[in-house]
Image (cartoon, grey):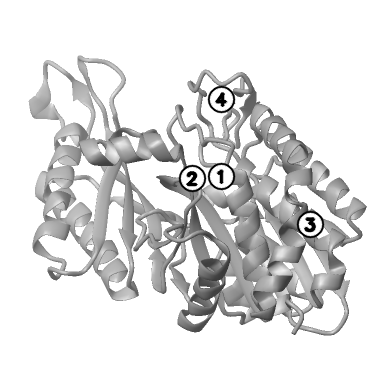
Amino acid sequence: MASAESARQILSGQDSIRDWQEDLYKDLHRNPELSHQEVRTSGIVADQLTGYGFDVHTKVGGTGVVGVLANGEGPTVLLRADMDALPVAEATGLEYASTASATDASGTQTPVMHACGHDAHVSCLLGAAKLLSEQRDAWAGTLVALFQPAEELGDGAKGMVDDGLASLIPKPDVAFGQHILVHPAGTVGTHSGPFLSMADSVQITLYGRGSHGSMPHLSIDPAVLASMVVVRLQGVVAREVQPGEFAVLTVGKIAVGAKSNIIDDHAVLELNIRTYSKPVRDQLLAAIERIAKAESEASGSPKKPDIELYNSYPLTDNDPDVTARVTAAFEDYFPAGAVQDYGRQTASEDFSDVPTALGTPYTYWGVGMEDPETYRKAEEAGTVSSIPANHSPKFAPVLQPTLTTGTAALVVAAAAWLGKD
């Protein structure tokens, strides 16, 4: 197949960029930046793309960067990477571990770490862009390299769209994204249809009446009210969602009181839900509101709870035809057994906001990041869950073959449309 020949020609120079790419990754890892603060990272990206001959647009959606490389007549392919890090104190012990800190949006000083792998995503996309720019005789069309801020807040992709992304690039025929995951390094995982779940966070403020701890009869205790809400919420997925439908409802935070002998006048709960269908999502949100209001009424609360929805992520729903074409290209390029179906993932992403807004079909895949032998032993022992996963302070992808595989995956997918016949 012509696209496979094009991919192999483009990737023939991959060994020559290995040291540069590993150094780039380590530099990004040492210097992580929080969501909407990716100034240094976006500067590096813009400089690199400019050097490769891309037409570069900066400050898209705040700190986003978009590069366009036109190379004759042909389709337009969009490749995307996210850039932001997390407010996590690194505990990997790596020689290139982050010791960075920053002030977050609330004004709080916090440690910062690339605990989700976005440094790898940036390194892989820059590597793919470099290789494609150096082998322009192997492909034809237009490559759009999009580097997105603030994925961890769920508003970075939408921010780029709202800032006029569509006017800066030709309409893509197809869009691709990827994420490193706890699977053996050297593998790639595709999946047709829903791949990453929708996600919504909900903040509930419950109201009571404060009092001295020795005089509970004068209070309406929000700690008890919050506890009843939490217990009641545990029955939503177990007893209200139809068996066979996927749903997760997690109470991640309970904040109430300041001292052991003070009954506060309010409590705050923060919840997170994950779903694969809008009807189930709507069912969960309705149940949360119903329970919060009903328990407040049962407790005699002085007013109804405040319920706020925030940090919503769309469903990542891979186009079947695009996914089949990419999977076939992967199977033609990578060794036998390297291409897998990772199945549905309960994590969430805002990548799909970009192709959805542009009216472009897309697919999003996973790239393994764990030492294959370590993973095999853990799998045999039934301890894969003990491997530090994304968002862990001990999250430490092996550099290789993670970077080479992630870079190759982007090139191979792009070549499936841009490769010369």
**Quadrant of the rendered image containing residue 54:** bottom right
Of the image marks 4 and 3, the number of the one nearer the N terminus: 4
* Kind of residue sitting beneath label 3: Leu
Q: Which mark is residue 185?
A: 2
* Kind of residue sitting beneath label 1: Thr
Q: Which mark is residue 131?
A: 3
Proximity of marks 1 and 2: CB atoms separated by less than 8 Å: yes
As measured in the structure, the alpha-carbon distance from the residue carrying label 4 to the one carrying label 2 is 31 Å
Q: Position of residue 262 (x, y in %)?
A: 23, 19
Proximity of marks 2 and 3: CB atoms separated by less than 8 Å: no
Proximity of marks 4 and 1: CB atoms separated by less than 8 Å: no
Q: Position of residue 244 (x, y in %)?
A: 16, 69
Secondary structure at numbered mark 2? loop
10 Å crowding of disc 4: few (<14), some (14-19), many (20+): some
Mark 4 or 3: the one toward you: 3
Q: Up-down: is 258 above or below 223?
A: above
10 Å crowding of disc 2: few (<14), some (14-19), many (20+): many
As measured in the structure, the alpha-carbon distance from the residue carrying label 3 to the one carrying label 1 is 17 Å
| Quadrant of the rendering where the N terminus is positioned | bottom right
Q: Residue at x 60, y 33 (%)?
A: 104
Of the image marks 2 and 3, the number of the one nearer the N terminus: 3
Secondary structure at numbered mark 1? helix
**Quadrant of the rendered image containing residue 342:** bottom left
* Left-right relation of 149 to 40: left
Proximity of marks 4 and 2: CB atoms separated by less than 8 Å: no
Proximity of marks 3 and 1: CB atoms separated by less than 8 Å: no
Q: Which mark is residue 110?
A: 4
Of the image marks 1 and 2, the number of the one nearer the N terminus: 2
Q: Residue at x 53, y 47 (%)?
A: 152
Q: To which residue does mark 1 refer? A: 402
* Left-right relation of 131 to 361: right
